[in-house]
Image: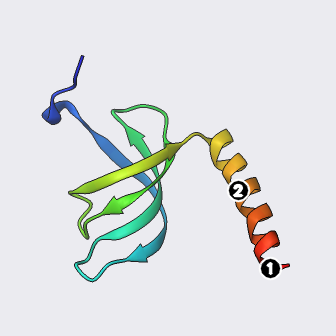
Amino acid sequence: MATKKEDFKYEIINELGIISERSKGWRKEFNRISWNGREPKYDVRDWDGEHQKMGKGVTLTEAEMRKLHELLTAEIAELDS
């Protein structure tokens, strides 16, 4: 069953960092977000400057974020060698 748009809620718990920024003010951000009052998760997505509009993104649990960190660390080591 689809959720009505007005029922959709989010709260940015921690703004962890900006990955990139586009000329129109949109930014790809890494944040910790609670979606619809649930336990916060880690999130990478595009946001407008006021956090009112968002693009598609990827939401990760802590375990998934740690695994991604492991994979990124290995890839960066490979790139640096």
Amino acid of disc 2: His
**Residue 32 location, x and y as percent?**
48, 51
| Mark 2 burial class by Cα count in 10 Å: few <14, some 14-19, many 20+ | few
Amino acid of disc 1: Asp
**Residue 45 location, x and y as percent?**
40, 57
- Tags 2 and 1 touching, CB below 8 Å: no
State whether residue 15 is above or below residue 77: above
The residue wearing badge 1 is 80
Q: Nearer the viewer, mark 2 or mark 1?
A: 1
Q: Secondary structure at mark 2?
A: helix
Residue found at x 26% / y 77%? 25
Residue found at x 23% / y 35%? 8
Q: Look at the image and tell me in which quarter the C terminus lies.
A: bottom right
State whether residue 26 is above or below residue 54: below
**Residue 73 location, x and y as percent?**
76, 64
Total labels drawn: 2
- Which label's residue is closer to the chain start, 2 or 1? 2
The residue wearing badge 2 is 69
Q: Secondary structure at mark 1?
A: helix
Q: Is residue 3 left or right of residue 28?
A: left
- Figure quadrant of residue 20: bottom left
| Mark 1 burial class by Cα count in 10 Å: few <14, some 14-19, many 20+ | few
Q: Look at the image and tell me in which quarter the N terminus lies.
A: top left
Q: What residue occupies the far top of the structure in this picture?
A: 1
Report the colour scheme.
rainbow
Q: What residue occupies the far bottom of the structure in this picture?
A: 23
Residue found at x 58% / y 39%? 61
Q: Nearer the viewer, residue 69 or 78?
A: 78
Residue 70's tag is: none
Q: Is residue 74 left or right of residue 50?
A: right
Q: Is residue 37 left or right of residue 77?
A: left
